Amino acid sequence: MDTMNEQEYCKKVQEVFEFLLSSSCHIHDDTLYHKLLDSLNGKMIIPEFAESCGVIDFLQRAGNNTDISPDTLVFAVQLVEKLVSKLELPGIHLENMSVLIETVALRTSVDNLSVFCALFTTMTTILQCPCIKEFCLNIDFQDILKKSFDILKEERSIFLSRAVSEFICSLFSSKMAESQEAKKLLKELQTIIVNFDRDGSQRVLSPSMLCSLRVLEKAPHLFNDSFAEILDVLIILMKIGSTQSSTTAARCLHSLCLQCQDRAKSERVKSLVTEAIETVDIVKGLHIAKVLYPLQLLERSSLENTILEPLQMLDKTNHSPAMHSSLPAVSLSLTIVNDCNIQKLEACKCVAEVLKMTENRPDDFTGSGCYSFTGSSKLQIKCLDYLGSYTSKEVMLSVISSISNIVSYTTEHMIYGKCLLCLCRLLPEVLCSSCYSSERSTVKSDLSKIKESVQRNFCSVEWEFRDTSCEFVRNLMDKHKDKEGVIQWMLDSRFHVFACQAVGDGESYVRATSLSTLQTVLLSSYRTNLLQDMNTTIDEIISQILDVCKTDSEAFPRRSAARLLHHCLLDLSYLLHPDSIQCIAQCFSTSLPSDFDWEVKLIVVEFWCAILKRCFDADLDKETSDQPLGIVVSLDCLKNEKDGKRGYVSISSAINVLLKLSCDYDPSVSERVCQELCWICETLEKFVLKISSATNDDNRSDWCVCAHCSQLITELLNRMTEGKEKTRNDSVFKTDYDSNAVSLLDDILLLDRSQDNNDEDNAIDCY
Amino acid sequence: MKLSCLSGNPSKPCFILHFKGVTLMLDCGLDISQVLKFLPLSVVPKSDNYDKKWNHSDKEKDKILGDELKEVAGSVFVDGSLEFCAPEFGMTTLSEVDAILLSNHNTMLALPYVTEYSGFKGTVYCTEPTQQIGRQYMEELVTYVERNPRNKKCSKWKSDAILSSLPTFLREAIRPTAWRECYTKHDIQACLSRVQTVGYNEKRNIYGALIITACSSGYSIGSCNWTIKSPYQKICYISGTSTLTTHPKPMDTEPLRQSDLIIVSSMTKTPGYNPDQMIGEFCMNTVVTIKNGGNVLVPCYPSGMIFDLFECLSSHLDSCGLTTVPLYFLSPVSDSSLAYSNIYAEWLSGSKQSRVYLPEPPFPHAELVSIGRLRQYLNIHDGLQNDFKSPCIVFAGHPSLRMGDVVHFIELWGKSTGNTILFTEPDFPYLEALAPFQPLQMKVCYCPIDTGLSFSQANKLMRDLKPGHLVVAESYVQPPSNLSHKTDMVVDYDPPPLTYKRGEILTLPIKRQFETVEITPNLAKNVSPVEVKPGCMVSMVTAALNIKDNKYTLELLPDGHLSGKKRRADGSLIREKSYIWGSLNIQSFVDALTRQGITDIKVEDTEDGSIIDLPNDDTLIQVEGASTHIICNGEEIVRTKIRDTLLRCLQKL
């Protein structure tokens, strides 16, 4: 910012502050406060600037002004937070700010929740600043602590309680922890814990108790004096409290145990926790185990037993009516197994067993002595999530059997998708089993069932199923392209044909996925199988894809189609008929650059850059004759348009497409082109130099001297420079306010002026 | 009031209802499932297909049987002309039936048997679409039977001695001796000429005794439920009803409310299958087959659900990118079926009707026909060979697989595993239907689509309609045999429903208590009514009761009869009696008694009235709401005095 702008900015900021301090200030849109705060935060690099802008004066007057609106007060408090944490302010400024904080803390009504939330958030930040002690010199810290403690006890708004709680926790990790005020507060917190009502009537913890426990969790060493009493309370809390209380107590116990130097004490904690887990009900026990498992307070194996207990019980009481009541426990157990990532055989067996129980059945049989878990999508998702990441060999065939049943009858595409993901992972080993296992007939039957279901779902009425099926083929190709057995199974099942036929699907998402899958198959070594099975040629497919690019009304398929053509031309051009190459090149030169979708245009940019790069590389290495891409663009002469002669696009046309896109209305496209133009320009310059030096070559010397080439390079350079400038000034994510900070101030001041006008203007505006 | 059930299949109902002296036949369904016992009528006869004679183990019986029975793939079939199981018309005298009410095209195929061969003189009522679509069904049936006739009539296997020794499939045949051959096209014309078409909610008077009204049932184009009303009773007949949203006009429940009795028939035949899911299955299986390069064969009727199938399937084929797959529709009435469906806009759902105002045909199949994607043929020789393109989807009749072009396609495609036969019509058990074609390589899918009322829908509907009584088929009050664990698959109602089954006559729990009688103006002039309570006036009338067309009229007595004098049968006069009425005013009565010289009267109020004590005459008078007792000590004079006084205190007619 130059001096002129700086002065204007400071002047406007002062005017804004005047307006904010006036009793007539009404800013209904609080985002303006936030933007002003961000703007000031960005500008305030040195304390002097804050002074010249009138920030210090504003904060001083804000503290003394009783007419100030609560929103402005919140803004002032937040401004203090920004300044104190960012700048090294002189003592006098710190004093002004501490006066503001104290005034707000002691004189403002607690009913003004937003002000107090901002105040405690600011204090939490300031506590961690180096100047905290100096800051606190000028305030009655004792009073602020007392106020915070009162707020906790009064159980006001949850947001305020949380802010206060954060503040108190932060206090004990700050330089103020050793202060007398902090010690006094700590005493009170200890008292709250020790005096906790142990008869069980207080199942939900009060904010003050929660805060005390948070402090205990974060700084257990401060509570050493009353270790025994606190341990007693925590164990009781674990046993009789709500799930939240129990888990909080468990975390505290872990903290306590960690800092405990005395081995006997530590052992006592562990034994009490173990006993508590055994005493509490199964769901609460699971919640506690979930907290303790990653903390390693207890032996993991014993916690695993607790976690897997509901699943193991199911196994034993397969058909007992009692099982129905354990659904929440089973669900929770599965969640924990997933969250804690317990990848062990025992867990895997249990999960596979639950999955078996949830197998969907045809409608006819629902209710005929089925488990209550039948078709439970909630459990299925959890089981499949787990088995998708880990499946032991012992249960693999059982899982495949369950998957075959689930995919046959499920009506939820999410479950179907997870089944296929799991299957994709297991398939290589399952296919081995289908050849060598003693249960190979069962495996073959399951795989055949899966094959039929997937084929059916390729033709499902719901597009999500069709989409997921196409995605499955792509996954198989991506993950197992080297595994012949898997690919052969896929080919035998004709999944690749089904997936690629979906290019003409009625749903755009399916078309897009199908095109991506088609790309994967075409680029693989199995393209011949596809072409044979579909009874088509690659050129026919390309023609179909070109149609999608030109006529599809939805962006997703056009993106996929453009990407496919891009890769086909780069990697498979040797298979394509020259007419197809010409069509692709023309499509990327004419239709796609004017597509409505920005991502399609980005693909066009990528396409031409990749082509140019290869051409330049090839030409510089003098390998043009071997490079199939050499036929796409001609490097003989930038001037010499070859499209009329050979039917391809010349390099100048390619560059012209990029130049055209550099002016695209979509900033993401133009910025990208400008980035790419740099290297193109550099390469061209090198190329020109190289060709210029080869003066003996009459053919080459043509283009370096011709006006067309010079003009093109000049234009490229100009556009690149413009682009860089534009990029520097104009980020995609920047708003008008970001580029012109004064305009924000003007807008705020306009609000002030609008008060002067009568309501008639507003009324007219409304119409 | 009686209800006779003539049909053993609640989906092909036929009832006789005797109501207020009128005999009504409710529906006239024909159970075609018996044709499954017969060999298919091949379109292109092949000598080797169904040639293996079935040999009875008893040589004597085998000799009697001759070559009536053939064995195909382990099953035994009758090698004779097709026969159908008509309703038990013997239960009633058909010439006495006053009217036949038809609900939809599915429940009228036995009509020619009634109208043409029984002396029936009544009228047949149905909606116009029902008449036309019913005609198409009948004509299709007759064409199939007559086109490739098997002239041999087999009846030896039906004799009790032989039947009992036949394999189960044939042994289960119900009264095969009563089975009848198909009627002719002439019968259809004659039969339908008796039909009087009605519109929805149009009232028709049956001999002055009953008012019948058809109201939309939502099952098919023109399908209806019937309300049968007398001035004091209302009976509803619900048959072939659907609460789902398909192409027909939605069900109208309003006219069915406040009925004394509802008779329910033609609920879904496949309660275990959800129609929406089945349509999805149908579309999916079709597309899978097509994508695998196979052909799809759909045995179907020429109308009804097929229109929804065309719509859903073409849309699904579009979504799967199969826009060029041809759909062939083969039926002797395919042209009229497609044409008629698009001219009945007022009988269709709101969405279909609104298309007419665009203007567009209500059904999308019109567009499919115009672009050549759906092609209709009368039979396989009607130019199909010229246009035939594979893979394709063929819709052809008959769903029983015993007649029609479908037989040809099964024989043609049955050997290839790539092809699929998709059953959507629930009328026939598909495995039995396929039995003569075994061994079959083509894939078989069963996706029955029956939009009729499911049990839960029926129960919900009845809770809403709240009829006084409910009459349902016996099979509706117990879970279906193949889903015996589904105890919720029953019609549940309070009071428990009455049930019917074939050959049973039910006495309906409705008693006629009142009748409306009109009074002529001349007679009315002589009447002096007395108001006995607010809004209720009473008078004595002596008049002649005239009954004509089930209407009752009171008229002045003809000349020569003394007005106001009642006579016995022998002509002697009956003493004129007066009728007393009203409540006794105790105080007036006491005053009147005092005026008669009775003194020292004591009145005591009790819970039910009053007790008047006349101690001087040793008499008690107990006056209660509807009676007065005079207890006196044998003093006749006192009693008479009290009686006369009492009568004077009451009002008289």
Image (spheres, grey):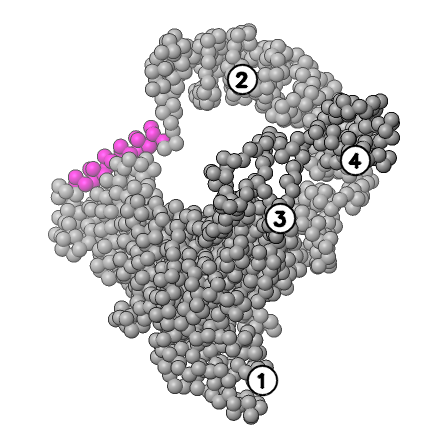
Dots 1 and 3 on the same chain = yes
Dots 4 and 3 on the same chain = yes
Q: Is residue A459 visible?
A: no
What's the chain of the residue with tag 4? B
Q: Nearer the viewer, mark 4 or mark 3?
A: 3
The residue that label 1 is drawn on is B161
The residue that label 2 is drawn on is A74
Q: Amino acid at mark 3?
A: Ser
Sequence-wise, which precedes: disc 4 or disc 1? 1
Q: Nearer the viewer, mark 1 or mark 3?
A: 3
User: Residue A323 location, x and y as percent?
Assistant: 71, 53
Q: Main secondary structure of the magenta part?
A: helix
The residue that label 3 is drawn on is B572
**Residue A652 belongs to the span the image colors magenta:** no
Q: CA distance from mark 2 to mark 4?
A: 96 Å
User: Residue A188 location, x and y as percent?
Assistant: 75, 22
Judging from the image, what secondary structure is the residue with disc 3 in? Answer: loop
User: Residue A168 location, x and y as percent?
Assistant: 66, 24
What's the chain of the residue with tag 3? B
Judging from the image, what secondary structure is the residue with disc 4 in? Answer: strand
The magenta-colored residue range is A710-731
Q: Amino acid at mark 4?
A: His
Instruction: Tell me: B390 left or right of B231.
Output: left
Judging from the image, what secondary structure is the residue with disc 2 in? Answer: helix
- Quarter holding residue B532: top right
Dots 1 and 2 on the same chain = no
The residue that label 4 is drawn on is B629
Q: CA distance from mark 1 to mark 2?
A: 103 Å
